[in-house]
Image (cartoon, grey):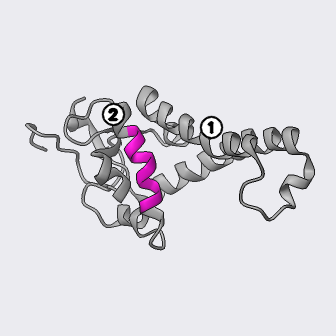
Amino acid sequence: MDSNDLEYVGFWPRVGAALIDSLVLLVLLIPALYLVYGGDYFLDEGLIKGPADVLISWVLPAVAYIWLWHKLRATPGKMLVGAEVVDATTGETISLKQAVIRYLGYFLSTAPLCLGLIWVAFDTRKQGWHDKIAGTVVVRRKGGRTAQVAFKGQQPE
């Protein structure tokens, strides 16, 4: 991937992408949870209601995000904003290991009042803590107002 054609994706487009992804997940997960547990599922205050809940609410989203980043470089929300998750050093598709680390890194990024997510707004490469931990960046074709991408061995213009 040629870094001269790319820019880092900033905070607000990534927030938009995350909101779109959340809506997609809700559209898929709510009917599945309703079919398995019925309407009372949404009234119960317990965190985990059973094995199907773990599978539908925790495992399925994790597998989906990891697979999408690793195979397609983007979730539906990122696709709609023209963003891709790539290796921070090479600009190539991230490894399965990086995708898993990035997903787990979200928990670290959100733990201290979402500081690791807000970090994207101030970082020169627009990396959240989950990106830094996994060695990833989120990029898109030029046209926005963020810093130009520079991968190892390439100089920005």
Q: Is residue 9 left or right of residue 12?
A: left
What residue do we see at 49% from left, 43% from top? 81
Q: Say which residue label 2 marks.
A: 94
Name the magenta segment's main secondary structure.
Answer: helix
Q: Say which residue label 1 marks.
A: 60
On screen, residue 128 above or below 138: below
Under mark 2, the amino acid is Ile
Which of 152/102 is in front? Answer: 102
Under mark 1, the amino acid is Leu
What residue do we see at 42% from left, 40% from top? 100
Q: In the picture, residue 145 is in which quadrant?
A: bottom left
Place of residue 151 in the rendered image (x, y in percent of width and height, measured from the top left): 17, 40
Pointers 2 and 1 in contact (CB under 8 A)? no
What residue do we see at 12% from left, 40% from top? 152
Q: Earlier in the sequence, mark 2 or mark 1?
A: 1
On screen, residue 149 above or below 119: above
Place of residue 17 in the rendered image (x, y in percent of width and height, measured from the top left): 53, 48
Q: Is residue 5 left or right of residue 57?
A: left
Secondary element type, mark 1: helix
Place of residue 26 in the rendered image (x, y in percent of width and height, measured from the top left): 72, 46
Which of 50/7 is in front? Answer: 50
Inspect this view and state whether residue 85 appears.
no
Which of 142/51 is in front? Answer: 51
On screen, residue 92 above or below 55: above
- In the displayed orientation, state which residue is furthest to the front: 51
Q: Which quadrant of the figure contains the N terminus? A: top left
What residue do we see at 45% from left, 38% from top? 82
Q: Which quadrant of the figure contains the C terminus? A: top left
Q: In the picture, residue 153 is in which quadrant?
A: top left
Does the magenta portion include 103? yes
- Per the rendered image, the range of residues in magenta is 99-108
